[in-house]
Amino acid sequence: MSGALRRPYEFDELAAMTRPLIATLSLDELPRFVEALEFEQKDSTTVDCRLEPRKVDANTVEMTGSVRTTVQVCCQRCLETLALDLQALVQWSFTSDDTGDGAGNDTGNDTGTNGTGAGIDLLSWVEDELLLSLPQYPTHVQATCGGDSMKKYMSESVTDDKESVTPFADLKKLLSEKKPS
Ligand SMILES: [Zn+2]
C-alpha cells in the first residue's frame, strides 16, 4: 500500500484503524526535504514509513512508528559524498480538532493543527520528521572520512598502494633482508 499517505486523513479514520500504515515514499513527494538536502539524490531513494495509530480516547489518537531513509549529503569535514542513514522515531498526537471539524478552535497544545480543515496530512508530518532528523553538520564517521583535503592528497602521494599502511614496518623488513646473513 504505497499510496497510504497520499491523501489527508480524517480523525475518525485514524481512530478506527486497527493496522499500521505502511508506506514507501519517493523523494518526489517530499520537496521540502529534498530542498533541505542540497545535494543530488539517487533516483532509487525511498522513504520507508511505518505508522501505528492508537486511539487514546474519543478525541485523541496517538501515532507511533518510524520513518527511515538513506540520503546523499555533503560531508562537512571532507566535502565528499556521504550516504546518511536517517531514522526518525515518530510520536504524534492528534485531536479531533486537527481535522477542522467542530468549531476549529486551536487547543494551544503542541500536537499541531494544520488549520486548513482538510484533514490530517500525514505526508507533511513525515516530511517534518525527516527535516528535524537531519544533522546540521553531517560528517563521515572518523574512520571512513577523508579528513581535510590537504591531508588526503599528501597521503595519496606518499603511497600508491592502499594496502600499505605500515611504511616503517616495510622499511624494517627491507633492511633486514639486505643484511648479510
Ligand atoms: Zn568525510
Image (cartoon, grey):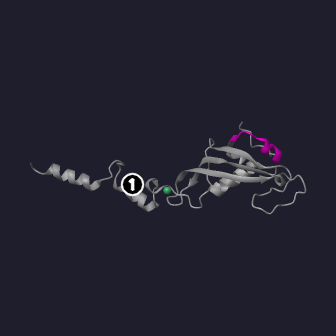
* Image position, residue 11 (x, y; %): 81, 48
Q: Position of residue 106 (x, y in %)?
A: 84, 61
Is residue 99 at least partly visible in the picture? Answer: yes
Which is nearer the eye, 68 or 30?
Answer: 68
**For the point 85% across and 50% down, which residue is it?**
118
Looking at this rendering, what residue extends furthest in the right direction?
A: 103
- Magenta stretch: give its range: 11-23
Q: Is residue 34 visible?
A: no
Q: Position of residue 151 (x, y in %)?
A: 41, 61
Under 8 Å from ligand 1: the CB of mark 1?
A: no
Residue 76 position by quadrant:
bottom right
Instruction: Answer with the quarter of the image where residue 133 lies.
Output: bottom right
Residue 15 shown in magenta? yes
Is 7 part of what is drawn in magenta?
Answer: no
Query: As rendered, which of 5 and 30 lies closer to the eye?
Result: 5
Label 1: which residue?
156
Q: Nearer the viewer, residue 115 or 151?
A: 115
